[in-house]
Image: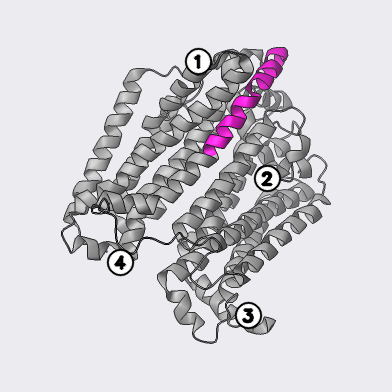
Amino acid sequence: MINSEFAGTGRLIRLALHQNRILRMIWLLLPALIAIGTVSSYSSMFTTQQELLKFINESVSNPVVIGMHGHVLTATLAGLSAWKIKVLSQLIVGIFNIIVVIKLTRSEEESGRFELLGATVVGRQSHLAAALIVAFGTNLVMGLLITLGLSSKLPLAGSISMGLMIALSGCLFAAMAGIAAQLTDGARAASSIAISAFAAMFILSFLNNTNVESGGLLLITPFSWFFAIRPFAGDRFWIFAMILCLIFVFTIAAFILSSKRDVGEGIFHPRLGRSEAAPRFKSPLALSWRLQRGMLLGWTVALGVFGFGIGSVNQTVAKMFNESSSMASWVQEYGGPNEAFFALVLFVMALFTSAYALLAVLRLRSEESSLRAEPLLSASVERVRWAVSHIIFAIVGSTIIMITIGITSGLSSGVIAGDVWSELSRTLGASIVKLPSIWVMAGIAVLLFGLLPKLATGLSWGIFGIFLIIQSIWELGQVNQAVFNLSPFAYVYPNHSITAMPLVILTLIAGILIVGGLIGFRHREIG
């Protein structure tokens, strides 16, 4: 019985390896190249221990760097290099694992290809098994490449720790995506669930990094495994046994959920619609609302809850900042103890809201590639009107999410501080000013959809990743401000003086990008 469930897994693995080869090569090589480049750069940058210590002290004086990366475990070239590459590499492998596993599982079912293959000698668990085996194997090879790259100049034990940690991070994200693929009947909804969990893990790590003592979150999120394993600073290899158990539990959970649902369905069944369409269901906007509302509601509730939690601990963190003499200098750059923590976390949550905006826009490409758009556009629905109906949810939806974050965080902080109106107005304003940078990301996705539809999804996420990489290396002082200004997020960075003119310019740029994308879509062929 078990053998029949996994029949054909080997052939599906070969098919999966044949697909997306360019994406897989980037997945394999990019983290290793980042590791090799970082070590080479730092080894030539510092000629004395004093220079290294000065750089570390300057880097950890930036609160965003502390929140993103935590503290350096050991003041050595190896310790600095490992600290620098861990978060960026985990972000990259996390996104790749989610995309690939969802594509090889839920997307195959949604398109109907899984049902065709399932009618042959292919077991119902074989698609999930093949997807996870491909993802796990790719992660392990990628981890080996990182180990080889680091060990050329750094100690072998620490290099193995780093390579294995990043590889197992990818495996956990792959298993998490496998679970998400079983919960819903749509690839986009599954991606939203997986990315929301991914964002939650990152935010938990961010909160943990702002605390001097790590506490109990180290194994909950892969972004904090670094401080439990301590590469190049003790190398606690026994932690990997606990991580493997966690991955095993996630993997088994994915297979159990897969066995309890019908093909093409999810664990959570969609609510049945009416036998006849409601009178208001007569426009492209009504259809877009039906398609987009679940994702918008999920993201709003999830980030709103995070906002409430952030507000509830703000006074505690502010007290810690106020009592720490080592943090006094940079806290003032962010407006003082009460404003610093909010400024940091709201900026990070704006980055995740940008991911929502991309998903909302790219629903256009999903509808087009799945051939659901063509019947609509062949009738009386105009192209631009149909596209705008989805773009509205990227713009208005991201606005709703950021306003919700501002309201929930301000209310919880205000209740604890005893001044609800003051806290609410402050957090709401800080949330709203982030919106133009988010809209620029939505505009980039619209432009790519209109001009380069087949590359729109990959390029949109790739450009978003490039902006994050630029921010990361700017925070560590490896590029100047002019390079960072290429990113729309540079103009809403928490310790910068945010003025009206850059926000107006960003809004105009977003509008120009959207109009350009709509013009391109109007004049190109569908498909």
Q: Earlier in the sequence, mark 1 or mark 2?
A: 2
Amino acid on which disc 4 is placed: Leu
What are the residue bounds of the magenta stretch? 303-326
Q: What separation in Å lies between label 4 and label 1 (alpha carbons)?
A: 50 Å
Residue under pointer 2: 221
**Number of disc labels:** 4
Residue under pointer 4: 371
- Specify whether residue 345 is in view: yes
Answer whether labels 2 and 4 touch (C-beta < 8 Å).
Answer: no
Name the image quarter holding the N terminus: bottom right
SS at badge 3: helix
Residue 492 placement (x, y as % from top left): 44, 26
Q: Earlier in the sequence, mark 2 or mark 3?
A: 3
Q: Is residue 317 magenta?
A: yes
Q: Earlier in the sequence, mark 3 or mark 1?
A: 3
User: Mark 4 or 1, which is nearer the eye?
Assistant: 1
Please tell me which residue lies in front, 405 or 339.
405
Q: Residues within 10 Å of mark 2 (few under 14, many from 20)?
A: some
The secondary structure making up most of the magenta span is helix
- Specify whether residue 520 is in view: no
User: Mark 3 or 1, which is nearer the eye?
Assistant: 1
Q: Residues within 10 Å of mark 1 (few under 14, many from 20)?
A: few
Residue 291 placement (x, y as % from top left): 37, 54
Please tell me which residue lies in front, 116 or 41.
116
Residue under pointer 3: 5
User: Mark 2 or 3, which is nearer the eye?
Assistant: 3
Q: 91 above or below 351?
A: below
